[in-house]
Amino acid sequence: MKLADLRYSLPPDRIAQLPAEPRDAARLFVASASGPGRHRRVRDLPALVAPGTLVVVNDTRVRKARLRGSKRGSGGSVELFLLRPLAQAVAHGRWECMGRASKALREGAVVDIPGIEATILERRGKIVIAELRTVDGSSLEGAIDLAGDVPLPPYITRATTAEDAERYQTIFARELGACAAPTASLHFTHNLIAELEAKGVTFATTTLHVGLGTFETPSVDDLDDHPMHAEPFHVPERTVAAIADARLRGAPVLAVGTTVVRALESAADPERPGFVLAGGGDTRLLVQPGYAFRVVDRLLTNFHLPESTLLALVGAFVGLEAMRGIYRDALAAEYMFFSYGDAMLLDKFGP
């Protein structure tokens, strides 16, 4: 599809700079093929999700991926944004990063970060490969947590605060590895989960470590030419069993976030439509209009950036015209957009 099909105009003041308080107070646009959209709150989900529904969430945990330091010798400022480890030991490891510096980072450059020494090994376009090593031989993950900053996206223009360390993490976060939050899950509270479970809704987890594949904006005119970056995912046996049970009961599978959609669809059983296989690996799945969903029946997701692969996924789920209508109505109703913004609950009714 053409990137131009994913353009819309968003006033800057509609980009959420702060999260809703409490988490489930965020607004919720409810869309289906059977009628006009409804305006609710995330806390209303127990009235909007059928008993027996299986809700699948992403249990990835965001690391403090933004490291700031100085180039040894010149003292020039450097920022390394950690995308994913390529090889990691206790006190050192090789990482794929995005690098920003006052002057171009060259191979062999050494960056001093509090508690960490980073050596640039290779440049791959906008990506650099760096070896990170702790200066005292301690745990590298511990040093990253101490030196790093919460990786809020650049459209949140304020400085990060101590509260962001908790609010930019979902209550499901278990498996460390993401450099951005799976934002649809940010809306859940323990009380909301308890209310849903009391109604007979069940929960399962999958893991997709959010990386460049999720948040990089395409720079091509046609999405077919966009190179999706690999992101690691894993679907555990218990989630395979939960989905199989939902199918046997005739219950829908509701994915919380586009990362869950991509993980489950990447794990789809080719022999049994609607079922998944345990395991994982790297996924480069790009979902755009024309994609035939094999696992996911409903989707809870935030409002996404123009010209993004995430917006293309929504367009595939509900159809491009319906997606444009939802976004047009949400703008008119003054919803807030992006990571700390409001959400949509969507039935699958594409193309």
Image: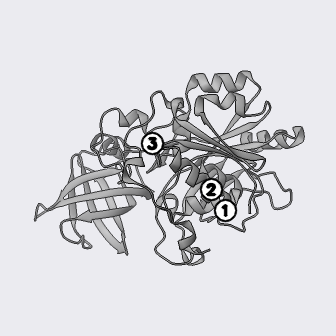
Q: In the rendered view of the protein, which quadrant contains the C terminus?
A: bottom right
Q: Are marks 1 and 2 in contact (CB under 8 Å)?
A: yes
Say which mark, if any, is on residue 321: 1
Q: Which residue shows up at 79% across the image and 42% down it?
A: 252
Local SS, label 3: loop
Q: Earlier in the sequence, mark 3 or mark 2?
A: 2
Dot 2 corresponds to which residue?
325
Say which mark, if any, is on residue 340: 3
Local SS, label 1: helix
Residue 164 lies in quadrant: top left
Which residue, as the protein is rendered here, is positioned at the far front? 332
Residue 115 rendering spot, x and y as whole percentages: 23, 46
Q: Residues within 10 Å of mark 1 (few under 14, many from 20)?
A: few
Q: Is residue 215 visible?
A: yes
Q: Are marks 1 and 3 in contact (CB under 8 Å)?
A: no
Q: Which residue shows up at 33% across the image and 45% down it?
A: 144
Q: Which residue shows up at 52% across the image and 54% down it?
A: 304
Q: Earlier in the sequence, mark 1 or mark 3?
A: 1
Q: Is residue 239 left or right of residue 190?
A: right
Residue 287 lies in quadrant: bottom right
Q: Disc 1 residue type?
A: Glu
Say which mark, if any, is on residue 133: none
Nearer the observer, disc 3 or disc 2?
2
